[in-house]
Amino acid sequence: MPRKPVARDAVLDAYESLLIEVGERAATLDAVAKRAGVSKGGLLYHFPNKEALISALLERLDELAQEDIEQMKAAPDGSAAYFIRSSLWADTPMDRAFVAATRLAEVAHEETRRRFAGIQQQWLDVLAEDVGPEIAKAVSYMGDGLYFNAMFEGGQGTGDASREADVEILLGVLDRLRK
Amino acid sequence: MPRKPVARDAVLDAYESLLIEVGERAATLDAVAKRAGVSKGGLLYHFPNKEALISALLERLDELAQEDIEQMKAAPDGSAAYFIRSSLWADTPMDRAFVAATRLAEVAHEETRRRFAGIQQQWLDVLAEDVGPEIAKAVSYMGDGLYFNAMFEGGQGTGDASREADVEILLGVLDRLRK
DNA sequence: GTCTATATCTGGATAGAC
DNA sequence: GTCTATCCAGATATAGAC
């Protein structure tokens, strides 16, 4: 099994962090290299160009999303409740990869959008098994709304208790809909 | 009453369109000038720098948002239903200004984010009058989720009937919650 | 594998002619 | 008011030394 070099991962982590913290525009190769503690040349050895960096990020996102879907399916109180709870920023590897990728999608990166659509659809399918197709839509949109709102407010959704309260409210709404 | 020059509006329209269609990154002064049919120098006569362009866009957004809030309050079947319906991309002046501004918010433009938060809060207040604070949250998030999803999929949410069906579903869910 | 130096290009902005 | 010409900074990417 070929082990990936650590420097490569460090670069990818740095790129991800910068996308989250300062946005796509400021996540330059210079900034990424500096954050990762390598030179620009060093960075470009691992990722020949910026697209390669993006591709690697999307690969990572897909892997983490698959794991997340499994977790969701196995959630004891149902995938819908799991989904709503996980729509809160928790700084997990999945959250980080997802938000980072979102920054790219906004910049009209088509490949990124396609990936999102795929993940989205899988979520919806799992939700439909739990609560049926209609409520699945409602849950899916609520979760997305929560997610995007949290993203907007402070770069990294810095610990605001109000969103957590909102999660409780949405879980309450879900219960009402289940009946 | 001082009439604003048409060229100025043309420039602003061009900037808005480009933000929607190609994203923040590609909405350069060059591109905006070309789209508006003026030279870069001509553009910079009306807007001395890019920030001025952004400010003007946010002003426009605020004006349109205030009008929208009034419409929402006056909606015959309640503000919640109005809100859900208006979360679909309809290529209205309001939609255009909103989505364009979203592109900036993603790029971590703080002023833009503040404006969004303000509008968001006003919507929530109006919704709460209609359906109470809890359901207001649910409706708000569903609407936002719908909005962002539509935004993501094709630059301008090019006429897909499936989202319209989703609106009907969400209206149905709203009815169930109202009881 | 990683670094330095450098080439190339593009975007934002200024200066001044018309 | 609008244009052309130009400057400057910063971003991507290449070349080649170590």
Image: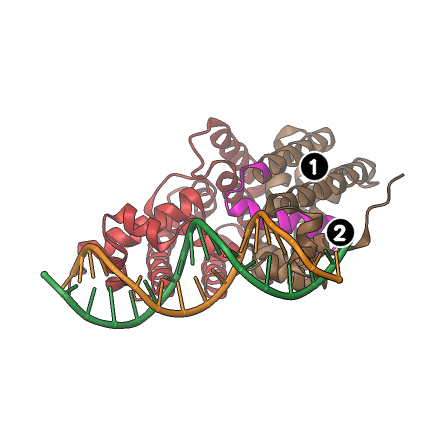
Chain colours: A red, B brown, C orange, D green
Q: Residue furthest right?
A: B1
Asked whether residue B96 is drawn in magenta, I would say: yes
Query: Residue A89: which quarter of the image?
Result: top left
- Tell me what residue is drawn at x 34 percent, y 60 percent: A53
| D17 up-or-down from B174: above or below | below
What is the spatial separation of the Cα atoms under label 1 and label 2, in whole angstroms? 46 Å
| A164 up-or-down from A110: above or below | above
- Please state the horizontal and vertical placement of residue A126, each as a whole percent of the image: 45, 56
Q: Are marks 1 and 2 in contact (CB under 8 Å)?
A: no
Q: Nearer the viewer, mark 1 or mark 2?
A: 2
Q: Which chain is disc 2 placed on? A: B
- Please state the horizontal and vertical placement of residue B8, each as a whole percent of the image: 75, 51
SS majority, magenta: helix
Asked whether residue A63 is drawn in magenta, I would say: no
- Tell me what residue is drawn at x 70 percent, y 34 percent: B127
| A68 up-or-down from B117: above or below | below
Q: Earlier in the sequence, mark 1 or mark 2?
A: 2
Instruction: Quarter of the image for the N terminus of chain A: give it.
Output: bottom left
- Secondary element under disc 1, as helix, strand or loop, is helix
Query: Residue B69: which quarter of the image?
Result: top right
Q: Which residue is mark 1?
A: B178
The local crowd at label 1, few if under 14, some if 14 to 19, many if 20 or more residues have their Cα within 10 Å, is few
Instruction: Quarter of the image for the C terminus of chain A: give it.
Output: top right
Q: Which chain is disc 1 placed on? A: B
- Secondary element under disc 2, as helix, strand or loop, is helix
- Residue type for callout 2: Arg
- The residue stretch that appears in magenta: B90-111
Q: Which residue is mark 2?
A: B8
- Residue type for callout 1: Arg
Q: Are marks 1 and 2 on the same chain?
A: yes
